[in-house]
Image (tube, helix red, strand yellow):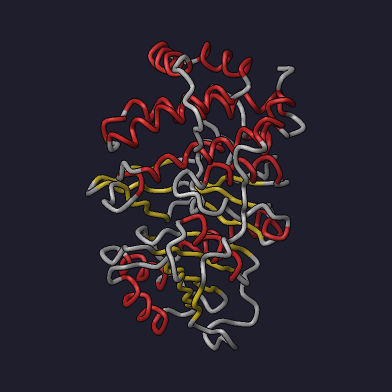
Amino acid sequence: MANQVANAVEYSPVHSFATRRSPGIKQAVKTNDGPRPNVLDVVKLSVIVPFYNVQQYAPDTLRSLKSNAREDFEFILVDDCSRDGTPGILARAERELPGAVLVRHEQNGGLATARNTGIDRARGEYLTFLDGDDWLAPGYFPRLLAAIEELGCDFLRTDHVQCTARARSVHRVPVGRRNVVLDPREAILPADRSTSVDYAYAWAGIYHRRLVERGLLHFTDGLRTAEDRPWIWKLHREAESFAAVSLLGVFYRRGVASSLTQIGDVRQLDFIRAFDQVIAETAADREADVLLPKAVRTYCAIISHHLGSIERFEPPVAKKLKTLSAAALRRMPQDVLDEALDSMDLQRATRLRRLRRRPAAAGVAA
């Protein structure tokens, strides 16, 4: 792994990883710009909820927030320039939801940017997230807050319920020890198993404000997909403590037609920018030789996953997926990549080796 330092340097000009809100995204803040009569001066929990064209689901989301309201909670509703009936729904919520703070983007910035807007507005001692098409069990947030206060750690990870049409399934944090404060770095490995950095859902947890002050909670601005991946890796590399608890209360809606996971357009290719950032930052870590095999192997698995369902992409996007993925493989630390491919099953390894041999295209950029 002697070339890791060189690879870390090689990555630096490929992308820049801004984690603050883009200056191009203008905000229009309506609610409570002065004193907030429906929120105490001391806010215990800030809940950040981005919305974009989710008029079908937003009423359920907002009702579930109301069933979790408390006088020391605030709900930061970020309308990411919706073009359907979502703004009207949020305008009513502004009046009816205790602790509501409505922020509107004047242009669409994507989920990562919308979350950053909410983080910048948040006043709470603790922060958490919810997506505008998901919902909560009644009283979930008070229980979540009590759990992290009892444990006293930087952040807490929770299980969740995945909802696809009428089907329900419980998804667990891949951490064996529960209700015990742990070192986040030790939960990154092993490389060949699912670990806490693979469970990248920002809404499946709660985070102390000191993470904001340390620059660890903001997302990479402008990422349209896989925005949680650099974020969860950064938390696990740099935060001091975390815990996992067996607390169910978030209902994650899968299969939503407007979700980027269901749309095969060019925005899906932002996973390459996201994982390039993971590789670059991990290569600069003090334990790069230990952590890079996990990062590289995960990146390879995601590339293989997209190639395995390439028919869902529009033809020009499918072609670009292959070109950008081949370039990404060539940018990885090659000795670490060799080890990762040797450890994978034959089908995935063959697919990636074939892609690795693909001739380089001139002027390729993710």
- Does any portion of residue 3 appear in the rendered image? yes
Compared across the picture, whether 71 is left or right of 352 comes to right
Q: Residue at x 46, y 31 (%)?
A: 324
Q: Which of 364 and 346 is in front in this view?
A: 364
In the orientation shown, which residue stands out farthest toward the right?
Answer: 286
Number of numbered discs on residues: 0
In the picture as drawn, the residue positioned furthest to the left comes out as 166
User: Residue at coordinates 32% horizontally, 75% vertically from top-left?
Assistant: 89
Give x and y (percent) for residue 354.
42, 14
Q: In this view, does 40 lie above or below 204?
A: below
151 with respect to 222 (left or right): right
* Screen quadrant of the N terminus: top right
Of residues 140 and 313, the one drawn nearer to the viewer in this rendering? 313
Q: Give the x, y percent position of residue 279.
A: 61, 32
Q: Please tell me whether residue 228 is drawn above or below residue 132 in the rendered image.
A: above
Residue occupying image coordinates x 46% and y 61%: 140
Frontmost residue, 59 versus 121? 121
Q: In which quarter of the image is residue 281?
A: top right
Q: Is residue 161 left or right of residue 149?
A: left
Residue 25 image position (x, y, % from top left): 51, 66
Q: Where is residue 292, by image quadrant?
A: top right
Residue 145 visible somewhere in the drawing: no
Query: Residue 39 at what x, y percent from top left?
Result: 56, 81
For the residue pair 288 and 320, the one nearer the viewer reads as 320
At x 45% / y 73%, what residue is drawn?
104
Give above or below for 53 relative to 5.
below
